Image: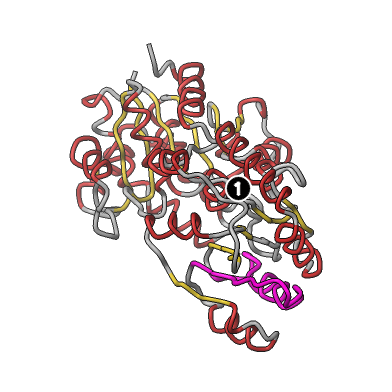
Amino acid sequence: MKLGIFLSMFPEPHETFILRELVALEREGIEFEIFSLQPPRDPITAAEAQSLVDRKTHYGKLLGLSSLIAFASAFVRSPISMLSIVGRIIRHGWQRPMDLIKDLAVLPLSFKFAADFDRLGITALHSHWANVPMTACWALSRYTGLNWSAAIHGEDIFSKNPMLEYKLDKATFAVVCTDYFRAHLADNMGHSHPKNIHCNYHGLEPKLVERAQQFEFDYDRQGSKNILSIGRLVPTKGHAELISALGQVTPDLDIRLKIVGSGPAEQELRDLAKRVGVVDRVDFLGLLDHQQVMQAIEEADVFCLPSRFIPGHPPDGIPNVLAEAMVFGLPVISTKLGAIPELVDDGVNGLLVTPGDIAEISEALRQVFTDDSLRSNLGRQGRNKVMGLFDQSRNINELIGFFDRYHGAKG
């Protein structure tokens, strides 16, 4: 059988985990075609992405003439079904006008794609993210009778969204990338089949894992120590609390903080470093490429991402940078927030503090920098945890098992 996989945009540079999944599915013999609702915004630099674009990816214009003709034709062939689809979107989406407009706008192109399903041999549909690709799969499933499933990556599932609740209840099954998100979706959205919502962790980049396995961390190295933090410079990542905590660490400890990332809070963070007297110990490195990030991890002594919750912003899942630091054996400090405790067991393979608690962050830093044995134990146990939880081969086989069970996608 053959999957039709819907995405908002393929390839998307920030969604490397989706690219890795698609490559692994093809390697395991799963047949699929990719339907991208938008053309790529950025130049395609990954050879694997270009290969999938050339061989398996379909594009079109949302409101192009051919899309509108396909949509009108579907109305002529099945007016009652099409009116029901449009009516459902309006009924469940009117409280979120921008989402409603997007959900309606995606329909013409979706039905243009559907006109090729028989020729391509598509027998089931699968969407990524909880927004318009999910709407496309739900609508086309209702029209064609094909089974459909969804992969949800944490976006927009914590705010009131009646259309999401309705669509998710109609999916044959759904996968989500943390158990924290799975529990939220299964328990809080009134599903008729919550058992069909599964946790399926992402795998780490194979080249990163290969490099990490060849790297031997020196937990006893002498001299100045480096804290590394990676993330967009926004309040939810906790950089302000980390800088303030650095100001509370005794000056007897020779510690520098290196922050990788960019964002709207950069100047505010620079000003904070001046106010707390650590401006000469904080380096803002900006955006780095993947090779530079791995080098920064190898040169660090501790990784700290003290994420915090801010109303109106979705809580963290499992930050990829946290797992990437751990697979290198770098001791980590983070917070008891969202899905982070699924990865970091406090005191076993990392340290967890209360979100926003500067004193706790400062104390955690003091502990790891004054106790060589603790630093070593946390780093080694962290590597073991990540290698088990984010084993790409195992997780891909689990996903294929879901396709097999619900769609018969392998055999």
Identify residue for label 1.
Answer: 318
Q: In which quarter of the image is residue 200?
A: top right
Q: What is the x, y in percent for residue 137?
A: 43, 37
Q: What is the x, y in percent for residue 248?
A: 76, 76
Q: What is the x, y in percent for residue 69?
A: 23, 45
Q: What stretch is highlighted in magenta?
A: 233-260
Please tell me which residue is depicted at 71% across the width and 65% down the height of the picture: 311
In this picture, residue 132 sits left or right of residue 306: left
Q: How many numbered marks appear?
A: 1
Residue situated in front as seen by the camera: 319 or 409: 319
The answer to whether one can see residue 121 in this image is: yes
Residue situated in front as seen by the camera: 327 or 57: 327
The answer to whether one can see residue 159 in this image is: no
Please tell me which residue is depicted at 69% across the width and 73% down the height of the picture: 246
Q: How crowded is mark 1: few (under 14 residues within 10 Å), some or many (20 or more)?
A: many
Q: What is the x, y in percent for residue 406?
A: 50, 19
Picture quarter with the C terminus: top left
Quick check: 294 above or below 210? below
Task: Determine the residue located farthest toward the top in the rendered image.
Answer: 411
Colouring: secondary structure
In this picture, residue 303 sits left or right of residue 391: right
Q: What residue type is labelled 1?
A: Ile
